[in-house]
């Protein structure tokens, strides 16, 4: 898979969930602190600037930019799985170097936008550059064909059908898809460097759901498995820090008790947050890295 910024979000969420399920939960209690609020303001400022630079919200994919289609065969699975994660793909045949004509992105609410695309060769280059790590013992995957098609991808405005390059690999029926939309037609932000010795404050939300035109969002995150009425449990509340282009969600932990000795097991939890205005096309950002999360809005 690609080296996704979203893996950082997942790791941060799991860590936050582990803390909220153990004896350190008291450190997260008591409401959002000044550091967390400053992170939210910094994230909004960065997102506002990125939106202004791109000329609008555009197309903002969240989650994996690279998707495996199908299951690896037993004979090649061990090598191919690790090679894909490492980004070890190479063209064994000539791939198109010219970008196709502009293509349509369509969201589930019927909204469409015409976007510029990138060539199969460029998409493969971006895929390999995003590899997670080296795998010297892995044999590279051989790309023998590329086909422009479409697939459902997660975006900051919910699922959308978007153009993707489908790569055929030698020796397997598995296909690899890579989003074919040009990055310059989307909103791109670079998260701050991750310092494990001085990690950002707060808990990261992983997704949000709501209704079109509504002001309530239900956000999901990793927290304690049990409610605050149970030993080692916790309840959670959420609030939003907003701008005209995005909202940052802050999660507050209300633990059963402090300094309890508990297991570091996390579970998916939810909280409801009230927005000052309907979400509209604004992105929902998590507070640790200031990056967008998947949002699903349904008709009222």
Image (tube, helix red, strand yellow):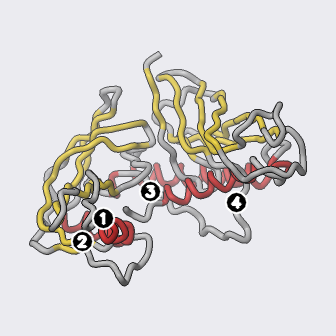
Judging by the rendered image, the residue that carries numbered circle 1 is 77
Q: Residue at x 25, y 58 (%)?
A: 176
Element under label 1? Answer: helix
Which is more foreground, mark 2 or mark 4?
A: 2
User: Which residue is outermost to the bottom?
Assistant: 136
* Residue 126 appears in the figure: no
Q: Earlier in the sequence, mark 3 or mark 4?
A: 3
State how far apart marks 2 and 4 are (Cα): 37 Å
Between disc 4 and disc 1, the foreground one is: 1
The residue beneath circle 3 is: 188
Residue where numbered disc 4 is placed: 200
**Label 2 packing within 10 angstroms: few (<14), some (14-19), many (20+):** many
Q: Which residue is mark 2?
A: 141
Up-down: is 98 above or below 46?
Answer: below
Q: Earlier in the sequence, mark 2 or mark 4?
A: 2
- Please name the residue shown 37% across and 69% down the image: 82
Residue shown at 14%/60% (left/top)? 146
Q: Earlier in the sequence, mark 3 or mark 2?
A: 2
- Up-down relation of residue 192 to residue 163 (above or below): below
Mark 1 vs 3, N-terminal side? 1
Which residue is depicted at the point 66% across and 70% down?
195
């Amino acid at each position: 898979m690609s080296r996704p910024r979203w893996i950082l979000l997942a790791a941060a969420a799991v860590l936050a969930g582990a803390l909220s399920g153990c004896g350190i939960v008291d450190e997260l209690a008591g409401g959002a602190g000044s550091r967390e609020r400053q992170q939210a303001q910094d994230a909004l400022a960065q997102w506002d600037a990125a939106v202004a630079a791109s000329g609008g919200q555009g197309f903002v994919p969240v989650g994996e930019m690279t998707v495996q289609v199908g299951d690896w065969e037993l004979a090649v699975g061990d090598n191919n799985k690790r090679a894909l994660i490492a980004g070890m793909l190479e063209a064994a045949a000539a791939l198109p170097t010219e970008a196709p004509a502009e293509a349509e992105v369509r969201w589930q609410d019927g909204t469409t936008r015409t976007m510029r695309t990138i060539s199969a060769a460029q998409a493969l280059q971006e895929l390999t550059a995003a590899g997670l790590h080296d795998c010297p013992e892995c044999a590279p995957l051989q790309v023998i064909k590329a086909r422009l098609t479409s697939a459902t991808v997660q975006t900051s405005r919910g699922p959308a059908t978007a153009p993707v390059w489908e790569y055929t690999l030698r020796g397997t029926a598995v296909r690899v898809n890579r989003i074919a939309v040009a990055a310059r037609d989307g909103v791109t932000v670079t998260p701050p460097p991750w310092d494990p010795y001085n990690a950002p404050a707060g808990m990261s939300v992983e997704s949000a759901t709501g209704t079109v035109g509504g002001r309530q969002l239900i956000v999901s995150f990793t927290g304690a498995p049990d409610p605050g009425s149970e030993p080692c449990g916790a309840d959670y509340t959420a609030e939003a820090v907003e701008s005209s282009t995005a909202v940052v969600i802050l999660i507050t932990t209300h633990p059963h008790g402090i300094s309890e000795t508990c297991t570091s097991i996390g579970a998916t939890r939810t909280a409801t947050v009230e927005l000052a205005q309907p979400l509209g096309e604004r992105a929902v950002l998590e507070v640790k890295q200031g990056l967008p999360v998947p949002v699903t809005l349904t008709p009222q």
